[in-house]
Amino acid sequence: MTDRFMFVKWKIKDTFRAWKGKMLQKTSPGIDGILVTVGLCIIALVLCVVMKDSLTTFIKSLVADMQIRAGEILKGSP
């Protein structure tokens, strides 16, 4: 192989390594938010399935307390 060919081959490899390094460092800012959102949705679904009964009890007690407090506010009680 000639020196010129070896130089071109080396230059191509060097350019490819630099390009590959830059591409691996860059991340899309939108993909991180999407992954976090999907992860949180999966966690919420798992919690709803696993804790269905206790979640229902919690929501019912929360709504009941809010209704009592709303009634107190409407009556003017502190």
Image: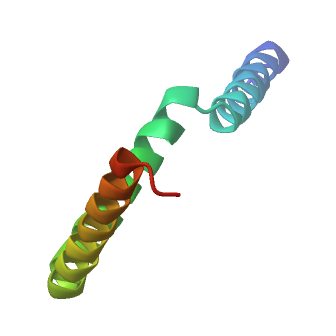
Name, please, the residue furthest toward the front: 76
Horizontal relation, residue 15 to residue 42: left or right = right
Q: In which quadrant of the rendered view does residue 45 lie?
A: bottom left
Q: Residue at the location (33% across, 69% down)?
A: 65
Residue 26: x and y in percent read 66, 30
Foreground residue, 10 or 29?
29
Vertically, is 35 above or below 52?
A: above
Q: Which residue is pictured at 47% across the width and 35% down the height?
A: 31
Is residue 28 among the parts visible in the rendering?
Answer: no
Residue 61 on image: x %, y %:
27, 76
The residue lying toward the viewer, choosing from 2 and 31, is 31
The part of the image, by quadrant, that contains residue 42 is bottom left
Instruction: Give 19 or 10, whichever is nearer the viewer.
Output: 19
Name the residue at 33% across, 53% down: 70
Residue 64 in the image: above or below residue 51: above
**Residue 2: x %, y % from top left:** 78, 19
Give the percent coordinates (x, y) of residue 44: 30, 64
Name the quarter where the N terminus is drawn. top right
